[in-house]
Image (cartoon, rainbow, N blue to C red):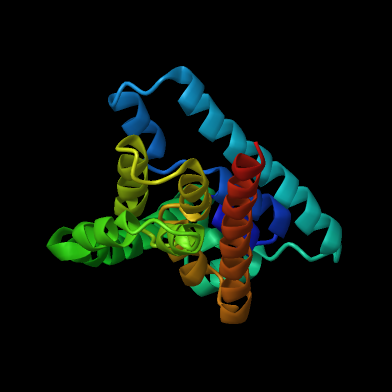
């Protein structure tokens, strides 16, 4: 939803980044199902929320160029026939996006099932100063498997909080898929990915530094 709103320029880049960063994907249900303490759950959610809000304000402050709302352009590209009524056009656009997500997610799930999760476990088991860099990169995978592995490894005391925050900040579910489908400006999409990735890495490193000082 947020990605489509940004594609039509109804919301700002800062708002989009804030939503991406604060999205929990599969992290929250896993923490709840594993009986994690409310303190742990709210600490992670609060960190993601604060980082998302602060980052969004900074991005919008640096990017104050006004843009024109482009709903008509999206309608033409999606061929959802907005002129024939809001219900028909909404259903057409939703079905189009849904089928795209289903197909891509299907292939990603196959990859994760046949060795993907095992590979991620092996990567994260070698904990080092570069873990936030790797966790942020893994978090960008548009599949719930990434957030599941990251959260499970944290609960099993394999990953530190800094790496978990890095990975969960960049993990926005299928939003990245929708971004590349709906927004035809590939350079802009890559720039958004890099911004999200850098915020994830820097946040993880900052948490590591704070823990070291304390």
- Is residue 213 placed above or below 163 in the rendered structure? above
User: Is 129 on the left or on the right of 61, as rendered?
Assistant: left
Which residue appears at 72% of the width and 50% of the height? Answer: 56
Query: How far across and down, in percent of the image, does residue 138 sit?
Result: 40, 61
Q: Residue at x 60, y 78 (%)?
A: 185
Left or right: 137 with respect to 187? left
* Horizontal side of residue 159 vs 186, given as left or right: left
From the viewer's perspective, tell me whether residue 100 is left or right of residue 64. Answer: left
As rendered, which of 214 and 145 lies closer to the eye?
Answer: 214
Taking the image as drawn, is residue 94 in sight? yes
Q: Residue furthest left?
A: 114
| Quadrant in the picture for the C terminus | top right
Residue 174 x %, y %? 41, 56
- Is there any visible trace of residue 12 in the rendered image? no
**Residue at the front extreme, as displayed:** 213
Q: Position of residue 84 (x, y in %)?
A: 51, 58
| Rendering quarter of residue 16 | bottom right
- Whole-percent x, y for residue 162 in the image: 52, 46
Residue at 39%, 60% (x, y): give it. 142
Residue closer to the observer: 42 or 210: 210
At 58% across and 72% down in the image, what residue appears?
189
Mark count: 0
């Amino acid at each position: 939803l947020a990605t489509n709103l940004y594609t039509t320029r109804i919301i700002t880049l800062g708002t989009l980044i804030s939503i991406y960063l604060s999205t929990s994907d599969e992290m929250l249900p896993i923490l709840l199902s594993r009986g994690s303490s409310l303190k742990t759950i709210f600490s992670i959610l609060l960190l993601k929320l604060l980082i998302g809000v602060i980052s969004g304000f900074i991005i919008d402050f640096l990017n104050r160029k006004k843009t024109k709302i482009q709903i008509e352009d999206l309608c033409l590209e999606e061929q959802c026939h907005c002129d024939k009524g809001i219900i028909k056009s909404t259903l057409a656009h939703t079905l189009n996006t849904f089928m795209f997500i289903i197909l891509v997610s299907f292939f990603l799930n196959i990859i994760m099932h046949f060795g993907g999760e095992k590979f991620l476990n092996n990567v994260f088991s070698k904990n080092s100063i570069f873990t936030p860099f790797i966790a942020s990169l893994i978090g960008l995978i548009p599949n719930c498997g990434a957030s599941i592995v990251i959260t499970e490894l944290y609960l099993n005391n394999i990953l530190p909080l800094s790496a978990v925050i890095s990975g969960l900040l960049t993990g926005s579910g299928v939003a990245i898929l929708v971004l590349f489908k709906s927004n035809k400006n590939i350079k802009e999409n890559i720039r958004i990915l890099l911004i999200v990735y850098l915020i994830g890495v820097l946040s993880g490193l900052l948490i590591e530094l704070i823990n070291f000082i304390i």
